[in-house]
Amino acid sequence: MANFNIDYVKNATYDAIVIGSGISGGWAAKELTGKGLRTLVLERGRDVKHIVDYPTTMKQPWEFEHRGQVNLDVKTENPIVSKCYAFYEGTEQFFVKDKEHPYVQEKPFDWIRGYQVGGKSLLWARQTQRWSDFDFDGPARDGFAVDWPIRYKDIAPWYSHVEKFAGITGNKDGLPNLPDGEFLPPHEMTCVEKYFKEQVSKNYKDRNVIIGRAAHLTQPKPIHYQQGRAQCQHRTICERGCPFGGYFSSNASTLPWAMKTGKMTLRPDSVVHSIIYDEKKGKAVGVRVVDAHTKEMMEFYARIIFLNAAALNTNLVLLNSTSNRFQNGLGNDSGTLGKYVAFHNYRARISGEYEGFGDMTTDGRRPNGSYIPRFRNLHKQETDFLRGYAAGFDTYRSQEHDYSGLGADLKANLGKSTWGKWHVGSHMMGETIPKESNYVALDKNLKDPFGIPQLKIAIGYDENDEKMIKDYHTQLTEMFTMAGFTNIKTFDSHQAAGLDIHEMGGVRMGNDPKTSMLNKWNQLHACKNVFVTDGASMTSTSTQNPSLTYMAFAARSVDYAVKQMAMGNL
Ligand SMILES: Cc1cc2nc3c(=O)[nH]c(=O)nc-3n(C[C@H](O)[C@H](O)[C@H](O)COP(=O)(O)OP(=O)(O)OC[C@H]3O[C@@H](n4cnc5c(N)ncnc54)[C@H](O)[C@@H]3O)c2cc1C
């Protein structure tokens, strides 16, 4: 038995463990294995292999049993995930179903998750903007959160590092609030988007409209071909999984790259229960895992642990990692674990029409849109709310069809289809303020199917968010009117927090261990061999999409950790 234990420990011991195989975990795995570390990647969901496990990727619309829609039973049984625009018959296999993984909504919160190898990287909308010092300076300048322990210059080289490998399309716009990256050629704006850009530049000195920056291979480089990826085909059905690897996902990019090193062991169906803290050694020594099929509890060991389970699950794992030393969760000396969670305010929209460009339309598809970088409260506080919003901007031209008649008549009438007006639309992406009262905690009574406490979520909007929605509607109405758009309508979806799918915080970075969980290297202040490099680590949320920043943090943090190991500090 003693020998068996020694063998078990030996076989279950790695240099590094990564918890979660989504966007950030994939990057941690790639970087760790690339630096020669034997790395165990633990993923709670099933395996999803690139190409072979994308069952709907080549399906034509008429090949879907319900013409692409999820049927009513699925909708009724899954009211939360059904609210996500990307949940349909072609993608439902990649989303968590409501009942299978319950949580407690102390306040309404639509928690959208993807539990499988690759996580949400299969499903994401691929928008990838860098953050700037207007974001990293924000909390200190406006006094709404602890100071970020880093600035743009610290992360900039790591943005370049991940952009070159992932492949990001974009235009070099030279904007201080949205730093340029290592871009592949940009997508084209439509004639109406170009027109709106001109009008906005002419009428506002501080506002811009640009083509979106997105993780698509518009012109692959050798490094992308080496990953087995090819040019994006503009199919715009990305969330079904792309057989070309035309967009960045962990499945197409980082995970197979890590696997090729021979240093990665990927263990799907492994639900991490908690991190094991050794009181005598004063550090973490491994993780407890529940096998998703047998429900057997097992342990794996490593010198360093990267936590990349996506923001709220990372909070859950740390909260559930208790010991004599850390009775309220691993590393939680500050008492801030689970608190100061924030998200993006995606409630506001605006639409309109444009009579011009009657002789123009678009050709083909584009897996991207246009983008209005944040312009509110950038250089000085100018509104009665803190921070600001970015916005998407999209246009399309409708077709008008005559569906009357039957048989030959119908065919003839359809042949007379005419082009309708140009439609213009925008949606707000607002920063929310991290607050102590927006928190997650372990429910004292309810457990999930693996015997792990359910997560209790108490996150919601406040007055700042309401004022921001009002301002977005006013400003965008003014900009649309100025451009000559008509039939302008504003909307507030009143959607719950969560549907933005950009939840962040709870394990925030900061300089002071008394008020934050992580130092500037994403390392737990109080347990130095545990690193958190997903959204949980974000001190504030910016207005930009967050995932590119998680990638850069993961790569930067691995570099630091491996150097520390080499110096014998970890
Ligand atoms: C429809 C949609 C559109 C989006 N659009 C954008 C966008 O345009 N731009 C952008 O930046 N972001 C976007 N996002 C958000 C983006 O997907 C996430 O920010 C990103 O995936 C987070 O990376 P992650 O590694 O933290 O989490 P994930 O990619 O979710 O990966 C986490 C992994 O950890 C696993 N896991 C969780 N708990 C455990 C556990 N206890 N044990 C073991 N494994 C565990 C999960 O199963 C999962 O595989 C979008 C998301 C969706 C769904």
Image: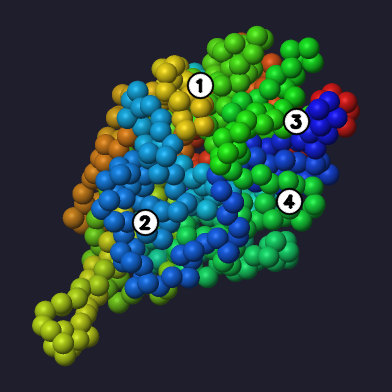
- 3 or 1: mark nearer the eye: 3
Mark positioned earlier in the residue sequence (3 or 4): 4
Category of crowding for the residue at label 1, using alpha-carbon neighbours closer than 10 angstroms: few (below 14), some (14–19), many (at least 20): many
Give the x, y percent position of residue 476.
30, 45
Mark positioned earlier in the residue sequence (1 or 2): 2
Do tag 1 and tag 4 residues touch (Cβ < 8 Å)? no
Question: Relative to residue 3, is residue 472 drawn left or right?
Answer: left
Give the x, y percent position of residue 242.
54, 63
Q: Amino acid at mark 1?
A: Gly
Q: For marks 4 and 2, give the CA distance.
A: 31 Å
* Placement of the C terminus among the 4 image quadrants: top right
Closest to the observer, 451 or 419: 451
Closest to the observer, 152 or 264: 264
- 1 or 2: mark nearer the eye: 2
* Secondary element type, mark 1: loop
Q: Which numbered circle lies on residue 88?
A: 2
Residue for point 59% across, 51% down: 47
Q: For marks 3 and 4, give the CA distance.
A: 20 Å
Category of crowding for the residue at label 3, using alpha-carbon neighbours closer than 10 angstroms: few (below 14), some (14–19), many (at least 20): many
Mark positioned earlier in the residue sequence (3 or 1): 3
